[in-house]
Amino acid sequence: MTDKRKVVSVVGDSSLEPGDPRMAAAERVGELLADHGYRVMTGGLGGAMEAACRGARRSAAWTPGTTIGVLPGTDPAEANEFVDVVLPTGLDHGRNVIVAQADAVVAIGGGAGSLSEVALAWAHKRLVLAMRCDGWSGRLADAPVDGRRRYPAIEDDRVYGFQSPDEVPELLSRLLPLYDGHHRGIRRRRP
Protein backbone atom coordinates (compact mmCIF):
# COMPACT_ATOMS: atom_id res chain seq x y z
CA MET A 1 0.00 0.00 0.00
CA THR A 2 1.35 3.42 -0.96
CA ASP A 3 1.03 6.42 1.35
CA LYS A 4 0.00 9.36 -0.87
CA ARG A 5 -0.72 11.88 1.88
CA LYS A 6 0.43 15.44 1.20
CA VAL A 7 3.55 16.45 3.12
CA VAL A 8 3.78 19.78 4.94
CA SER A 9 7.09 20.94 6.39
CA VAL A 10 7.13 22.89 9.62
CA VAL A 11 10.21 25.09 10.03
CA GLY A 12 11.26 27.33 12.91
CA ASP A 13 13.70 27.95 15.72
CA SER A 14 15.67 24.91 16.88
CA SER A 15 16.46 26.33 20.31
CA LEU A 16 13.17 27.60 21.74
CA GLU A 17 12.86 27.71 25.50
CA PRO A 18 9.97 25.92 27.22
CA GLY A 19 7.05 28.32 27.56
CA ASP A 20 7.89 30.20 24.34
CA PRO A 21 4.57 30.75 22.53
CA ARG A 22 6.20 29.66 19.24
CA MET A 23 6.77 26.23 20.77
CA ALA A 24 3.07 25.89 21.59
CA ALA A 25 2.18 27.16 18.11
CA ALA A 26 4.43 24.59 16.41
CA GLU A 27 2.94 21.81 18.51
CA ARG A 28 -0.60 22.89 17.64
CA VAL A 29 0.26 23.15 13.93
CA GLY A 30 1.71 19.62 13.98
CA GLU A 31 -1.40 18.26 15.67
CA LEU A 32 -3.73 20.03 13.23
CA LEU A 33 -1.75 18.85 10.22
CA ALA A 34 -2.03 15.22 11.34
CA ASP A 35 -5.71 15.73 12.23
CA HIS A 36 -6.32 16.85 8.63
CA GLY A 37 -4.46 13.95 7.02
CA TYR A 38 -1.08 15.53 6.25
CA ARG A 39 2.34 14.06 6.93
CA VAL A 40 4.58 16.41 8.94
CA MET A 41 8.18 16.92 7.84
CA THR A 42 10.78 18.82 9.86
CA GLY A 43 14.54 19.03 10.22
CA GLY A 44 14.13 16.36 12.89
CA LEU A 45 15.92 18.12 15.76
CA GLY A 46 14.66 20.20 18.73
CA GLY A 47 12.69 23.38 19.29
CA ALA A 48 9.88 24.03 16.81
CA MET A 49 10.79 20.82 14.94
CA GLU A 50 10.32 18.64 17.99
CA ALA A 51 7.17 20.50 18.99
CA ALA A 52 5.56 19.97 15.57
CA CYS A 53 6.37 16.25 15.66
CA ARG A 54 5.09 15.96 19.24
CA GLY A 55 1.83 17.62 18.22
CA ALA A 56 1.40 15.29 15.25
CA ARG A 57 1.97 12.29 17.52
CA ARG A 58 -0.72 13.60 19.89
CA SER A 59 -3.31 13.66 17.08
CA ALA A 60 -6.00 10.99 17.14
CA ALA A 61 -5.30 10.62 13.39
CA TRP A 62 -1.59 9.81 13.90
CA THR A 63 -0.35 6.62 12.29
CA PRO A 64 3.24 5.35 12.01
CA GLY A 65 5.00 7.30 9.27
CA THR A 66 3.17 10.57 9.92
CA THR A 67 6.28 12.45 11.05
CA ILE A 68 9.45 12.72 8.96
CA GLY A 69 12.77 14.10 10.22
CA VAL A 70 15.35 15.18 7.63
CA LEU A 71 18.50 15.30 9.74
CA PRO A 72 21.54 17.44 8.93
CA GLY A 73 23.93 14.78 10.20
CA THR A 74 24.44 11.06 9.69
CA ASP A 75 23.43 9.75 13.13
CA PRO A 76 19.76 8.67 13.27
CA ALA A 77 19.92 8.91 17.08
CA GLU A 78 19.99 12.71 16.74
CA ALA A 79 16.31 12.74 15.71
CA ASN A 80 13.85 13.87 18.33
CA GLU A 81 11.80 11.08 19.92
CA PHE A 82 8.62 12.01 17.99
CA VAL A 83 10.04 11.39 14.50
CA ASP A 84 8.64 8.26 12.81
CA VAL A 85 10.74 8.28 9.63
CA VAL A 86 14.35 9.35 10.18
CA LEU A 87 16.36 10.48 7.14
CA PRO A 88 20.00 11.13 8.12
CA THR A 89 21.47 13.11 5.21
CA GLY A 90 24.96 14.23 6.18
CA LEU A 91 24.17 17.41 4.22
CA ASP A 92 24.31 19.87 7.15
CA HIS A 93 22.47 23.04 6.05
CA GLY A 94 22.10 21.53 2.58
CA ARG A 95 19.33 19.33 3.98
CA ASN A 96 17.13 22.46 3.96
CA VAL A 97 16.54 22.00 0.24
CA ILE A 98 14.90 18.63 1.02
CA VAL A 99 12.72 20.12 3.77
CA ALA A 100 11.64 22.82 1.29
CA GLN A 101 10.42 20.22 -1.21
CA ALA A 102 7.26 19.44 0.75
CA ASP A 103 3.87 20.24 -0.77
CA ALA A 104 3.77 23.30 1.52
CA VAL A 105 5.98 24.91 4.15
CA VAL A 106 4.72 26.43 7.41
CA ALA A 107 7.20 28.77 9.12
CA ILE A 108 6.96 29.64 12.80
CA GLY A 109 9.60 32.15 13.87
CA GLY A 110 12.99 30.99 12.74
CA GLY A 111 16.50 32.17 12.10
CA ALA A 112 18.81 31.83 9.10
CA GLY A 113 18.07 28.12 8.62
CA SER A 114 14.33 28.73 8.46
CA LEU A 115 14.91 31.69 6.17
CA SER A 116 16.81 29.42 3.77
CA GLU A 117 14.00 26.84 3.84
CA VAL A 118 11.38 29.50 3.06
CA ALA A 119 13.52 30.99 0.28
CA LEU A 120 14.08 27.55 -1.28
CA ALA A 121 10.37 26.69 -1.02
CA TRP A 122 9.55 30.02 -2.70
CA ALA A 123 12.06 29.44 -5.51
CA HIS A 124 10.65 25.94 -6.03
CA LYS A 125 7.09 27.28 -6.34
CA ARG A 126 5.78 25.79 -3.10
CA LEU A 127 2.98 27.23 -0.98
CA VAL A 128 4.46 29.03 2.03
CA LEU A 129 2.57 30.00 5.19
CA ALA A 130 4.21 32.13 7.89
CA MET A 131 3.09 32.91 11.42
CA ARG A 132 3.08 36.57 12.37
CA CYS A 133 5.50 36.32 15.32
CA ASP A 134 9.12 37.05 16.21
CA GLY A 135 11.64 35.64 13.74
CA TRP A 136 11.78 35.38 9.97
CA SER A 137 8.22 34.12 9.63
CA GLY A 138 6.91 37.40 11.03
CA ARG A 139 9.15 39.40 8.71
CA LEU A 140 8.07 37.45 5.62
CA ALA A 141 4.35 37.05 6.37
CA ASP A 142 1.94 38.67 3.91
CA ALA A 143 4.54 39.60 1.28
CA PRO A 144 6.26 37.94 -1.67
CA VAL A 145 9.84 36.82 -1.08
CA ASP A 146 10.91 38.50 -4.32
CA GLY A 147 9.43 39.99 -7.49
CA ARG A 148 9.19 36.85 -9.63
CA ARG A 149 5.79 35.83 -11.04
CA ARG A 150 5.65 32.24 -9.85
CA TYR A 151 2.01 31.70 -10.80
CA PRO A 152 0.61 34.26 -13.26
CA ALA A 153 -2.96 33.17 -12.42
CA ILE A 154 -2.44 33.96 -8.71
CA GLU A 155 -2.42 37.73 -8.63
CA ASP A 156 -1.62 37.99 -4.91
CA ASP A 157 0.98 35.19 -4.74
CA ARG A 158 2.86 35.72 -1.50
CA VAL A 159 3.91 34.15 1.76
CA TYR A 160 0.51 33.85 3.41
CA GLY A 161 0.54 35.13 6.98
CA PHE A 162 -1.49 33.68 9.83
CA GLN A 163 -2.01 34.73 13.42
CA SER A 164 -3.23 31.48 14.97
CA PRO A 165 -2.26 27.88 14.23
CA ASP A 166 -5.99 27.14 13.89
CA GLU A 167 -5.95 29.06 10.58
CA VAL A 168 -3.45 26.68 8.95
CA PRO A 169 -5.80 23.84 7.88
CA GLU A 170 -8.20 26.24 6.15
CA LEU A 171 -5.36 28.04 4.37
CA LEU A 172 -3.93 24.73 3.17
CA SER A 173 -7.33 23.46 2.03
CA ARG A 174 -8.05 26.65 0.09
CA LEU A 175 -4.60 27.42 -1.32
CA LEU A 176 -2.77 24.12 -1.83
CA PRO A 177 -4.80 23.19 -4.96
CA LEU A 178 -3.65 26.47 -6.56
CA TYR A 179 0.03 25.72 -5.98
CA ASP A 180 0.38 22.75 -8.30
CA GLY A 181 3.41 23.82 -10.32
CA HIS A 182 7.00 22.78 -9.87
CA HIS A 183 10.34 24.42 -10.43
CA ARG A 184 11.74 23.38 -13.80
CA GLY A 185 15.38 24.23 -13.14
CA ILE A 186 17.50 27.34 -13.37
CA ARG A 187 17.84 28.63 -16.89
CA ARG A 188 19.64 31.54 -18.40
CA ARG A 189 17.32 34.29 -19.50
CA ARG A 190 18.08 35.55 -22.94
CA PRO A 191 17.32 39.13 -23.92
Image (spheres, rainbow, N blue to C red):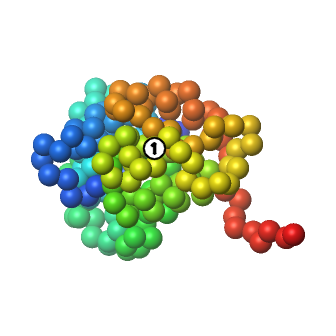
| Residue appearing at x 32%, y 72% in the figure | 74
Q: Residue furthest left?
A: 18
Which quadrant of the figure contains the C terminus? bottom right
Question: Do we see residue 93 in this rendering?
Answer: yes
Locate residue 132, reporting x and y percent: 37, 40
Amino acid type assigned to the residue bearing label 1 in the image: Ala
Q: Residue furthest right?
A: 191
Lateral position of residue 156 relative to residue 145, left or right: right
Residue assigned mark 1: 141
Q: Is residue 149 above or below residue 189?
A: above
Locate residue 21, reporting x and y percent: 21, 40
Quarter residue 91 falls in: bottom left
| Residue appearing at x 43%, y 59% in the figure | 115
Q: Would you call the spot at circle 1 few (<14 residues within 10 Å), some (14-19), or many (20 or more)?
A: many
Locate residue 20, reporting x and y percent: 17, 45
Quarter residue 23 falls in: top left
Instruction: Name the secondary structure under disc 1.
Output: loop
Number of dots carrying numbers: 1
| Residue appearing at x 30%, y 48% in the figure | 134
Question: Do we see residue 41 in this rendering?
Answer: no
Lateral position of residue 60 relative to residue 187, left or right: left
